[in-house]
Image: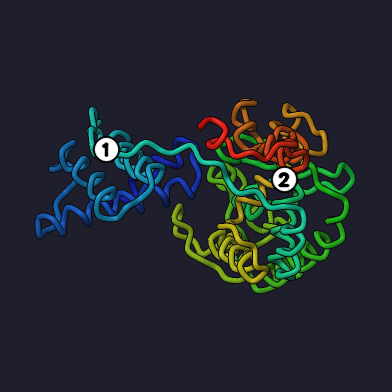
Amino acid sequence: MKLKEQLWKRIRAQGKSIQTAKTYWGWFERYLRFVKERDGRWRHPKELGRDDVQAWLSSLANEHWVSPNTQNVALQSALYVYREVLGKPIQGVNALRAKAPQRVRDVLDVEEVSALFDELDGLELLVAQLMYGCGLRIGDVVGLRIKDVSFSRKQLHIWDGKGYKDRVTQFPEVLHERMKEQMEVMRAQWQRDRHEGRNGVSLPFAWGRKSPSSHLDYAWWYVFASDKYSRSPENGKWLRHHRDRSHLSRKISQASKRAGIGKRITSHNLRHSFATHSSEQGIPVATLAKLLGHSSIQTTETYLHVSKDGATASKSPLEHLLRHPPRTTRNLARKTG
């Protein structure tokens, strides 16, 4: 069995997501290519070890200028493959790695959110509104299935979110009609697939084995299913997956530039904006933690910027000085002289 197939099998056996498998393999493949360019030939990873991993990580920092967080993902990917797939744990990696800076993420003002929405339409607009209106990650949105949407309870059920946690979050009524329209489009797609004898949608690994017929069950259809079929890396079958998250993220970033928003905006900023704006409206941090799927309130607090009515609204001493200047204007240097 090829190394990539072994990795996928191990990932699924541990209940990890498809995206995790893609990430781990992508970085490990870059590691193998680095060794090939360095040594002039392909080498089996079992021939390599800690020194090679350290050299690769240092190269990422010095030559490719990757961020500390990206470096850490690369390291964890390599360590996982060595430990879980090759059975050769690597310890004591001491590469040149920078400490991740503690940054404050950009949050959109309400006016900027509105301007961003004005530059989107159709499916991309609905995706952006779900992220901002429900505090969702882009992966949460594209992973939504028909059965996860409750109009009566005004809730969305998020399965296998980040950290493989399930949660229920709010589903604003203002999005219901647009969501119903999208689901009708998916119903028509589902009916065409059944009529043509297609294989249906991809399923969670374990459920796909227990209930193969669910591939054709409308309840399991993605709310944002892809227009095309692709080969499943798990079983090799041609199935309909959800839409590509990277493509949707790019559409949102491009829309922010068209709107003239002078910040570096990604789709994830909409989730941060949801948290900050909800906090400003008086939603307790503990409630936000549940809606966002955080195990710790401390994690939620990193999402919250200082409220515009909080510390930054306090009066600056400069404001007092300029509004109420001292009566004397004598030059202090002349006075002391």
Alpha carbon distance from label 2 to label 1:
39 Å
Q: Earlier in the sequence, mark 2 or mark 1?
A: 1
Residue 149 x, y percent position in the rendering = 78, 49
**As rendered, which of 336 and 301 lies closer to the eye?**
336
Q: Is residue 220 left or right of residue 105?
A: right
- Is residue 168 visible in this depiction of the protein? no
In the structure shown, which secondary structural element does the residue marked by tag 2 occupy? helix
- Residue 72 drawn above or below residue 268: above
Residue 51 percent coordinates (x, y): 15, 38
Q: Which residue is mark 1?
A: 82
User: In which image quadrant can residue 82 be found?
Assistant: top left
As drawn, 47 above or below 335: below
- Residue 107, given in percent of the width and then of the height, sits at 65, 48
- Give the residue number, with chain letter if any, for mark 2: 274
Residue at coordinates 65% horizontally, 74% vertically from top-left? 196
Q: What is the image's colouring?
A: rainbow
The three-letter code of the residue at mark 2 reads Phe
